[in-house]
Amino acid sequence: MTLSVGELAKRSGVPATTLRYYDAIGLLVPQRLANGHRRYPQAAVGRLELVRACRSLGLSLEEVAAVLGPAAGSGRREVAERKLSELDRTLGHLTAVRAVLAHFAQCRHTAPDDCEADVRTALSASNRQV
């Protein structure tokens, strides 16, 4: 059984206009009927869930197409490596922020300037962890 654009939109919660766009960029590959109508396999619902999951991970549509598209191959690895690098930088930043906030939460100094050395130490330690 195949699904029309409207049926797939209803089952997936993805607007028909978006489905047509995904078709245009190669994320979905419908069967074309003689009258030009699109028919999607049942598996398209799962494919859209995978697209949604990739988007929730912070991938742009271009990156999703590189990862899931018909010519993914090395593009998938390149996107994954780039995203891992970005994630490592973000984690490093968040670790540093957490270290400073943890210091402030436990700090007994009476003047903020007295925290400078402790904050530098916390930042330095968190940067070494990443």
Image (cartoon, helix red, strand yellow):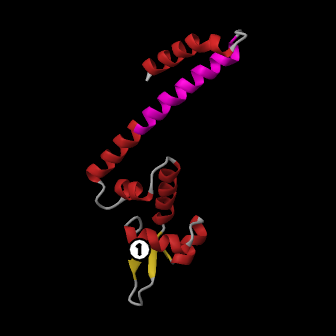
Query: Residue beneath label 1, please?
Result: 30
Above or below, comparing residue 27 to residue 54 in the picture: below
| Pick the front one: 21 or 46 | 21
Is residue 5 found left or right of 130 in the rendered image? right
Residue 25, horizontal then vertical, whole percent:
38, 68
Q: Residue at (39%, 54%) from the top-left corner?
A: 63
Above or below, comparing residue 3 to residue 64 in the picture: below
Q: Residue at (69%, 18%) from the top-left corner?
A: 105
Above or below, comparing residue 106 to residue 69 in the picture: above
Q: Residue at (44%, 59%) from the top-left corner?
A: 61
Residue 104, horizontal then vertical, whole percent:
67, 18
Q: Is residue 129 magenta?
A: no
Residue furthest toward the bottom? 35
| Pick the front one: 26 or 87 | 87
- Highlighted range, magenta: 86-107
Where residue 68 sits, quadrant-wise, is: bottom left
Q: Secondary structure at mark 1?
A: loop
**Dot 1 amino acid type:** Pro
Our reading of the magenta stretch's main secondary structure is: helix
Is residue 58 found left or right of 67 in the rendered image? right
Q: Residue at (56%, 11%) from the top-left corner?
A: 117
Local packing at callout 1 (Cα closer than 10 Å; few below 14, some 14-19, many 20+) is many
Residue 39, horizontal then vertical, whole percent:
45, 77
Residue furthest toward the left? 74
Is residue 31 found left or right of 118 in the rendered image? left
